Image (cartoon, rainbow, N blue to C red):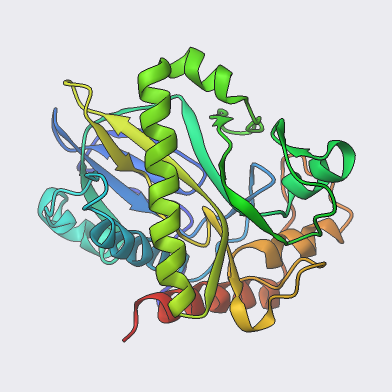
């Protein structure tokens, strides 16, 4: 087995940024190389333990969704082979886990769609009967399907800081009313189509996060990642029971371990036991298999 990659080191291209999971390099004025590492973040903290194979799984799942949903919105992909833009000795770092994308201007929000009442939304609903300020019917249970998918934007925090939910009005103030409406409507259309397909593969997509960018003409593109176990909550449909938080194919397994570890959710994060890292890797791979294999 190939050793996990915690951090890439592409010396042939200028490094632009290391995010929580992805390392971004400049290819030229119009293109970027994105390398998806095996880093994992939880509670907005990058953990010191990599998850074996995670970067390749995320890349394959994202590329699957980019292709499946490109009739709804164009995406960042260029089709350029990542190996063609790095030195020969760096091919192993990009194989299966990197993409060459259009250089676009990211929007300053994260676009979240919630289809089920869970996580922070469930906690808010218990306290106020709403999710991100949007009122919901009384009497809903944890993990209940929402009457309709909700667009609940958040801020895009810098590394080490926490994203914060914002109102739709705040999103309009950041983006303008026309662009905010386009993002909202596009998010919901993407979620509805993806959730419908995933249901045929035995997966419930409880919620997900999209990111968008614009070109110089203001055209909207889907960027970053799409409907992966890192950006979404995936539940096995055969184990779904409203009234409790179902098991998942995403990093909830790690979150649950962290919640019980006594960690204060501040950096630095704790090392994960080998069995937790291995089990998380298996959950990611199962999501890939269910979604993409015929």
Residue 98 visible: yes
**Residue 173 x, y percent position in the rendering:** 50, 13
- The reply, left or right, for residue 264 in relation to residue 280 is right
- The reply, left or right, for residue 97 in relation to residue 274 is left
Give the position of the C terminus as an image quadrant: bottom left
- The reply, left or right, for residue 241 in relation to residue 17 is right
Q: Quadrant of residue 141?
A: bottom right
**Residue 50 x, y percent position in the rendering:** 55, 62
Q: Is residue 177 above or below residue 52?
A: above
Give the position of the N terminus as an image quadrant: bottom left
Q: Is residue 184 above or below residue 61?
A: above
Residue positioned 73% across, 59% down in the render: 255
Q: Is residue 187 above or below residue 156?
A: below
**What number of labels is visible?**
0
Residue positioned 53% across, 42% down in the render: 112
**Residue 218 x, y percent position in the rendering:** 22, 22
Q: Residue furthest bottom?
A: 294
Q: Quadrant of residue 79?
A: bottom left
Residue positioned 57% across, 18% down in the render: 170
Residue positioned 62% across, 26% down in the render: 166
**Residue 191 x, y percent position in the rendering:** 45, 53
Residue 1 visible: no
Q: Nearer the viewer, residue 83 or 186?
A: 186
């Amino acid at each position: 087995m190939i050793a996990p990659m915690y951090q890439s080191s592409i010396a042939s291209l200028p490094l632009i940024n290391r995010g929580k999971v992805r390392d971004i390099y400049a290819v030229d004025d119009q293109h970027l190389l994105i390398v998806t590492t095996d880093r994992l973040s939880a509670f907005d903290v990058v953990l010191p333990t990599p998850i074996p194979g995670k970067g390749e799984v995320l890349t394959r799942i994202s590329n699957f969704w980019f292709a499946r949903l490109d009739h709804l919105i164009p995406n960042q992909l260029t089709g350029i082979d990542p190996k063609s833009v790095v030195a020969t000795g760096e091919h192993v770092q990009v194989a299966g886990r990197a993409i060459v994308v259009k250089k676009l201007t990211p929007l300053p929000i994260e676009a979240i769609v919630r289809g089920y009442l869970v996580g922070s939304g469930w906690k808010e609903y218990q306290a106020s009967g709403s999710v991100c300020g949007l009122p919901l019917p009384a009497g809903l249970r944890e993990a209940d399907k929402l009457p309709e998918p909700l667009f609940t934007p958040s801020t895009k925090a810098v590394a080490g800081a926490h994203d914060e939910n914002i109102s739709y009005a705040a999103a309009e103030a950041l983006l303008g009313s026309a662009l905010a409406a386009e993002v909202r409507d596009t998010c919901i259309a993407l979620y509805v189509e993806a959730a419908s397909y995933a249901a045929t593969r035995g997966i419930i997509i409880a919620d997900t996060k999209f990111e968008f960018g614009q070109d110089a003409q203001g055209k909207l593109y889907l960027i970053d990642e799409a409907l992966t176990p890192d950006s979404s909550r995936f539940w096995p449909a055969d184990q779904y029971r409203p009234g409790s938080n179902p098991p998942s194919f995403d990093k909830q397994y790690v979150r649950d371990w962290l919640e019980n570890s006594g960690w204060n959710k501040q950096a630095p994060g704790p090392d994960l036991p080998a069995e937790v890292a291995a089990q998380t890797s298996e959950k990611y791979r199962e999501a890939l298999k269910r979604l993409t294999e015929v």
